[in-house]
Amino acid sequence: QVHFVESGGGWVQPGGSLILSCVASGFDFSNHTIRWYRQAPGKERERVASIYSDGRSTAYRDSVKGRFRIRRDNAKNTTYLHMNNLQPEDTATYYCNAPAILMDTGYWGQGTQVTVSS
């Protein structure tokens, strides 16, 4: 059974940093692209960052480029999202998923809340 467990969220002031973690289970983690998404209140869920199975190829939405960094540890079935210089517009619930798994199962974890405010 597929599971994603996100953690590391919290409240920070603008300019602050957080590191989110996502532990996955129930599928062949090392052979899947993993993606972080976020959803702010009243808005649609959006892609934030992706890391491919090779662990080197990454992609980011424009608004987080240069501030966020995604990485993975296949030995731990874990993906991380390093977030720096956080801004109020980054406030959202953050989720991780594997696009191929999402397509098959429609499953989402509980996410982790990030709040950026002064």
Image: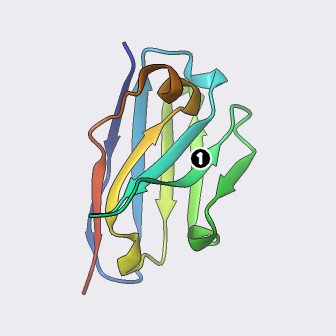
Residue at the limit of the structure toward the bottom, as seen here: 118
Task: Specify the quadrant of the image occupied by residue 19.
Answer: bottom left
Tell me the amino acid under the disc marked 1: Arg
Task: Specify the quadrant of the image occupied by residue 110.
Answer: top left
Q: Position of residue 4 (x, y in %)?
A: 37, 31
Identify whether 41 is placed above or below 96. Answer: below
Q: In the visual, does 69 lie left or right of 55? A: left
Q: How is the image coloured?
A: rainbow
Identify whether 60 is placed above or below 79. Answer: below
Tell me the residue at 46%/50% (across/down).
37
Locate the C terminus by quadrant. Answer: bottom left
Tell me the residue at 40%/52% (across/down).
20
Tell me the residue at 43%/14% (across/down).
26
Q: Nearer the viewer, residue 67 or 74?
A: 67
Q: In the visual, does 9 lie left or right of 54? A: left
Q: In the visual, does 44 lie left or right of 34? A: left
Query: How many marks are shown on the rendered structure?
Result: 1
Is label 1 in a helix, a strand or a loop?
strand
Q: Position of residue 95 (x, y in %)?
A: 39, 45
Q: Can residue 67 be spotted in the picture?
A: no
Tell me the residue at 47%/78% (across/down).
85
Locate the N terminus by quadrant. Answer: top left
Crowding at dot 1, Cα within 10 Å, few <14 / some 14-19 / many 20+, comes out as many
- Which residue position is annotated with label 1? 71
Q: Position of residue 43 (x, y in %)?
A: 35, 62
Q: Can residue 7 be spotted in the picture?
A: yes
